[in-house]
């Protein structure tokens, strides 16, 4: 079994609703900040003081509890390496992931030499807490959880996270909060997790803040865990543009609030469209909606692409045959998607 991140085509033109990016772009304040870059700054190794201060204030943690990463992807890789190195056939170290989930967990766990243990979501896509509790144990070195979950948009309860973390105090419980801006409650600063130093939270500024191309993520956790993670991340992992962009993005709370509102409205529009068109969908706490396009899914996805609208085919995922994940972003973009989907489906029926 090989685990690999599925690299999808990323057409430069057209409406990109396949990677859960911010479809409006970043805040204009970010470009203004990038415009202040000097020749000397470009020539010097980056200074993270401003970026760390902004992020620490934003998350309400101490700087020893935070590690900025080159996108959350790097944070996932660092967590996998830290937890799984030293794994061998005689004494395997296991990474527990639910399936389907974000590809990077299994890909990084595999790359780090660990053994990947996949636990399927329940048939209705609810969180498989009991199956996880049955499977975790002595060999478990890391458990990857995502809330809201990608690709289903479902929230994993705080109780479930805490129960798992108590069960395997020797393992890292990695809580990926890539979509927490759009729904659910963060576990960062939650008193229920305060005596659980094995919880590490992953955040990204790629989605709600629109910094996907600049690559900025963060890991938050107990001082000792963060210190261990810091040892496997290169010292200048973020470039100077990312370091300048982050404080500017975080400071523009109006833009952020506007975008999160657009996402919420778009989700509602997508649900209503699915109901009109008789398509099954999952109510989502994230900036995407998983839709069952049925037997003609491949054709529908291709017809949308021919019309310049890209959605993510999730058919290869367990239990997802005929499913597509559609980004909910700017309302005008969602209107365009819905109009085109109606056109494509009516032509096919
Ligand atoms: C997009 C995504 C990431 C990656 O974030 P980057 O900061 O772009 O590396 C991590 N986890 C999940 C669940 C995601 O969907």
Image (spheres, grey):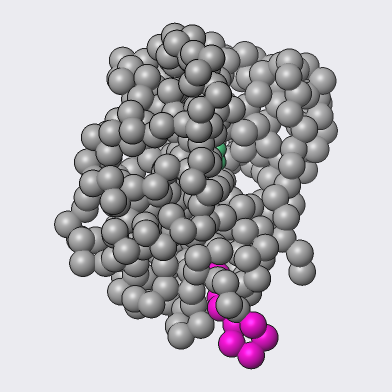
Q: Name the residue rendered at 77%, 32% in the picture.
A: 9
- From this view, report whether residue 64 is shown above or below residue 246: below
From the viewer's perspective, tell me whether residue 156 is left or right of residue 348. left
Which is nearer the eye, 190 or 172?
Answer: 172
- What range of the chain is rendered magenta? 88-95
- From this view, report whether residue 65 is shown above or below residue 45: below
Pick the quarter of the image with the C terminus. top right
Confirm whether residue 324 shows in the render.
Answer: yes
From the viewer's perspective, tell me whether residue 300 is left or right of residue 22. right
Seen as rendered, the residue at the extreme bottom is 90
- From this view, report whether residue 85 is shown above or below residue 295: below
- From this view, report whether residue 7 is shown above or below residue 207: below
Image coords of residue 94 (percent x, y)? 56, 75
Q: Name the residue rendered at 32%, 64% in the picture.
A: 224
Q: Main secondary structure of the magenta part?
A: loop
Quadrant position of residue 117 = bottom right
Pick the quarter of the image with the N terminus. bottom right
From the viewer's perspective, tell me whether residue 275 is left or right of residue 324. left
Let me know if residue 135 is in the magenta part.
no
Q: Name the residue rendered at 81%, 29% in the picture.
A: 302
Quadrant position of residue 185 = top left
From the viewer's perspective, tell me whether residue 166 is left or right of residue 139. left
Q: Name the residue rendered at 49%, 9% in the picture.
A: 35
Confirm whether residue 207 shows in the render.
Answer: no
Image coords of residue 342 (percent x, y)? 68, 20
Image coords of residue 192 (percent x, y)? 20, 61
Image coords of residue 56 (percent x, y)? 27, 39
Total numbered labels: 0
């Amino acid at each position: 079994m090989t685990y690999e991140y599925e690299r999808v085509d990323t057409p430069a033109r057209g409406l990109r609703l396949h990677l859960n990016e911010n479809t409006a772009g970043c805040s204009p304040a970010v470009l203004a900040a990038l415009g202040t870059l000097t020749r000397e700054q470009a020539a010097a190794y980056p200074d993270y003081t401003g970026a760390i201060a902004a992020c620490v204030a934003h998350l309400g943690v101490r700087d020893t509890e935070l590690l900025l990463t080159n996108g959350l992807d790097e944070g996932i890789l660092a967590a996998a390496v830290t937890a799984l190195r030293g794994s061998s056939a005689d004494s395997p170290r296991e990474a527990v992931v639910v399936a389907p989930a974000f590809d990077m967990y299994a890909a990084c766990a595999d790359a780090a030499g660990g053994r990947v243990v996949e636990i399927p979501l329940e048939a209705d896509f609810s969180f498989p807490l009991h199956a996880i509790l049955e499977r975790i144990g002595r060999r478990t070195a890391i458990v990857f959880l995502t809330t809201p979950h990608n690709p289903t948009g479902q929230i994993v309860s705080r109780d479930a996270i805490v129960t798992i973390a108590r069960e395997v105090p020797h393992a890292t419980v990695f809580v990926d909060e890539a979509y927490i801006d759009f729904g659910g409650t963060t576990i960062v600063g939650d008193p229920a997790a305060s005596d659980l130093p094995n919880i590490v939270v992953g955040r990204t500024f790629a989605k709600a803040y629109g910094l996907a191309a600049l690559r900025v993520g963060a890991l938050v956790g107990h001082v000792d865990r963060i210190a261990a993670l810091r040892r496997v991340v290169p010292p200048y992992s973020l470039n100077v543009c990312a370091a300048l962009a982050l404080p500017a993005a975080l400071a523009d709370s109006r833009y952020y609030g506007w975008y999160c509102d657009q996402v919420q409205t778009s989700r509602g529009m997508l649900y209503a469209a699915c109901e009109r068109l008789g398509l099954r969908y999952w109510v989502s706490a994230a900036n995407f909606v998983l839709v069952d396009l049925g037997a003609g899914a491949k054709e529908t996805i291709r017809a949308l692409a021919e019309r310049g609208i890209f959605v993510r085919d999730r058919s290869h995922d367990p239990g997802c045959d005929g499913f597509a994940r559609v980004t909910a972003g700017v309302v005008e973009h969602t209107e365009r998607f819905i109009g085109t989907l109606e056109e494509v489906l009516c032509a096919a029926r």
